[in-house]
Amino acid sequence: MDLEWLANQNMSNWTQFGIMEDRPDYEALPRRYHIYAILLYLMTASFTLIGNLIALVVLKNGKRTSRHLSKYLINLSCSDLLMATCIPFVYTNFMYGQWYFAPWLCPCMNAIQFYSVFVSVYTLVVIGIDRYIAIKTPIRSKTIDHLTNLIIFIIWLVGLCVSFLIYLVHETREIELRNEKIVVCAAILDKHEEMVSVTLMVCLIYLAPISILAYVYGSMAVVIFKRDLRSNSASKMLKRQRRKVIKIMMVVVIVFILCWSPLQLYNVLTIYFPQKFRSFSSDAELTRYVVTYMAFHLLAMAHSFVNPIVYSFMSQSFRKEFVNLFCSKFKFRKIPSSVQHGRSTSIRITDSVKT
């Protein structure tokens, strides 16, 4: 059976997997592969929970990171934790090809998943813009610090409005296949509406954010490079710290591209070229498609636990706060106060862009 037929019945892509007539069940992969998929999704959820919870505790109790920047990073961790709550539902729906949970959870989980991605991505964008202003016009940066709470509120509000649209177009429905009734969670969209929806989502949560991030971090790198050229008297330590800042800014953009590009590109290809990417003549082709999609989906989910590594653990000030917090809990020796507070110009530059 051509999977495009099921797509025309308004099923979601992951619901389409595994219902070819020569398969014994509706599952995306044979049972022997389930353990590997479970382990991968479990690891992704665990790393996301642990990494972001640690980041939350350290940022909440720390004093070295600027207050308004800490709020952005806490907001980022909260949105990534929200994503972790969706992973069990996403995995079950994806692997078993049907909806086993309460019907009201179908639109809720789809909306929450998009909500968490939206808030996470645009928090990254705001952090980038905030650091750009701090580098380009430090005085102006201090005057807009009081807007942090408002900006965070706007991100969540806009995300809520867009996610509500996701909520409205999803529902559970009962279908009959091979004389058996199953419940699926699907979007109520025809083919044209699905193409428009995918295109808008790619632009909203990928193309627009990556364009903004590339611009602001590229501009910051140029500013720092020019200052380095003009400051002939700058110490080697200062220049080394500046180069480190540029490298980490590059890491931020590259990680975002690596994590999100495969899934977004695949979504576009499958919706615009269904005959090539969603039609299968054998079980092996279907399995290959499922494995590819699952790998890209896991890579996108992995961005949620990479965020605290890039934005927190790669920061020297964060690492010191983490060590001091850990030591205070277990009564080990803390980092001397002279080391904590005797911060050089190079460290301040690093913290100003919050690596």
Image: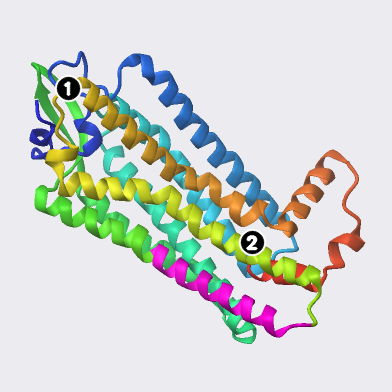
What residue is at 19 percent from the left and 32 percent from the top? Answer: 16
Q: Position of residue 330 (x, y in %)?
A: 84, 39
Q: Position of residue 158 (x, y in %)?
A: 36, 65
Amino acid bearing label 1: Ser
Q: Residues within 10 Å of mark 1 (few under 14, many from 20)?
A: few
What stretch of residues is rendered in magenta? 209-232
> How many dots with numbers?
2
Q: Position of residue 87 (x, y in %)?
A: 42, 37
Q: Is residue 218 left or right of residue 186?
A: right
Of 245 and 297, the residue lying toward us:
245
CB atoms of marks 1 and 2 within 8 Å: no
Q: Which mark is residue 355?
A: 2
Q: Which mark is residue 316?
A: none
Which image quadrant: the C terminus?
bottom right
Q: Is residue 150 left or right of residue 322?
A: left
Q: Is residue 181 magenta?
A: no
| Residue 197 position (above or below residue 274) | below
Quadrant of res 301: top left
What residue is at 75 percent from the left and 63 percent from the top? Answer: 64
Amino acid bearing label 2: Thr
Secondary structure of the residue carrying tag 2 is loop
What residue is at 50 percent from the left and 72 percent from the top? Answer: 216
Q: Residues within 10 Å of mark 2 (few under 14, many from 20)?
A: many
Asked whether residue 75 appears in the rendered view, the answer is no
| Residue 283 position (above or below residue 200) | above
Which secondary structure class fits the magenta region best? helix
Nearer mark to the viewer, of 1 and 2:
1
Q: Position of residue 120 (x, y in %)?
A: 46, 56
Residue identified by numbered label 1: 282
